Amino acid sequence: MININENFLNLQDSYLFSTIAKKVSEFQKNNPNKKIIKLGIGDVTRPIVPEVLKAMHKAIDELGNIETFRGYGPEQGYDFLKNKISEFDYAKRGVTISPDEIFVSDGAKCDCGNIGDILGEDNIVAITDPVYPVYLDTNVMAGRSGKYNNKTGKYENIIYIPATAENNFIPEFPNKVPDMIYLCFPNNPTGTTLSKSELKKWVDYAKENKALILFDSAYEAFISDEDVPHTIYEIDGAKEVAIEFRSFSKTAGFTGVRCAYTVVPKELIAYTKSGEKIELNSLWNRRHGTKFNGVSYPVQRAAEAIYSDEGQRQIKENIMYYMNNAKIIKEGLQDAGFTVYGGVNAPYIWLKVPEGLTSWEFFDKLLNEVNVVGTPGVGFGPSGEGYFRLTAFGTKENTIEAIERIKNMN
Ligand code: PLP
């Protein structure tokens, strides 16, 4: 008799985006003449830049020529791309990451989930709350969560570290020491960041406790403040305690193209139950080579083109376009009397919902009264209750109109 992985039965259905979609389509059906503006999605809208398209077209043509055809590539990614990553994303920031510490993949989402394959089942997991839901669900699937408690909205074995206005969105060390700590900065959904000195505290804490930091910097390209680290490896000692996830999705509009990478430094070690030290780089290399067959050649050539002078100029233009939207949202909401966070080093704006409303009630109010769609904060974790996320990924025209409507709301 075939058995299932019963951990999957422990997953809570995520009703967040399906409930939003249902509410929006119902509203549109009943109000066909109303123009709904969606500032809820976390997907980009600007097209891929010409320099990247040119490289992708060229690579596709190469595949049609017997002289330049390529079949399977290296599972870890082609050197032409890994060398650029090493030089531009690390060396230029004073950090040494060698190409064999970089693993190119088809998404940070997959990597954030798959990394659990090489880590012990009994590890205690800590996530910040609210947070990108993938960290939690993949640990539920792996059996690290314990049972779900309906009353608290939490899994019994997961450590939830609140990041709210009360602590200035700076997660504090939990009472119980975790083995795996997920940190995402700039943060989705709050749009907030950690300074170098705050991040250093976590690196030191991980070192002291022989814990591993899983650092998701999918929104690194949106950082503008000097004191916000672009990579965790800017912090001394981080190579001994942290894996970093990066993605071209939001950086260069690759959400549909799919390309990302994960850095597993050689210095990074974890332990067997008997205390033997094992290099995580070699474990991840083995896992990656066994379960993944590499990102397609044209996509890696496209990613490489991001690092050319013209590629950089063009993607930065798109990032500035989104960050201008973020400014419009942030300043507009502040003018309207809202308390607003994020939106400076990240394309997300996190606002406090008006006193007396839950985040879902505020969702309904925005949809019904001004026909604007956002995301209720509670969908990202229990500490997200009372907050609401708007994204800067819409068009400038729609963003301006949405904020005008909110300003005029009763
Ligand atoms: N990490 C965070 C924090 C995200 O918000 C997202 C996408 O929304 C991802 C990772 C997914 O990245 P990718 O498109 O590379 O899978």
Image (cartoon, rainbow, N blue to C red):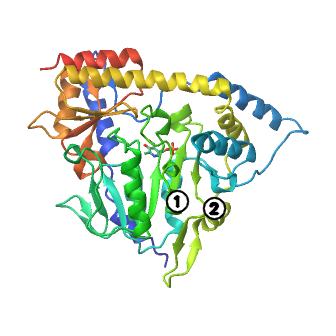
Q: Is residue 224 left or right of residue 38?
A: right
The tag on residue 114 is 1
Front-most of residues 106 and 120? 120
Residue kind at label 1, given as amino acid type: Asn
Q: Check the picture and name the quadrant holding the C terminus.
A: top left
Q: Is residue 322 left or right of residue 279?
A: left
In this figure, what is the number of numbered marks?
A: 2
Q: Residue at x 33, y 69 (%)?
A: 177
Q: Say if 355 sits above or below 136 in the image.
A: above
Residue kind at label 2, given as amino acid type: Lys
Q: Say if 402 sits above or below 141 in the image.
A: above
Corner quadrant of residue 153: bottom left
Asked if residue 99 shows in the view, the reply is: yes
> Which element is circle 1 on?
helix
Q: Residue at x 10, y 36 (%)?
A: 355
Q: Residue at x 40, y 34 (%)?
A: 345
The tag on residue 291 is 2
Spatial separation of the CA atoms under disc 2 and disc 1: 10 Å
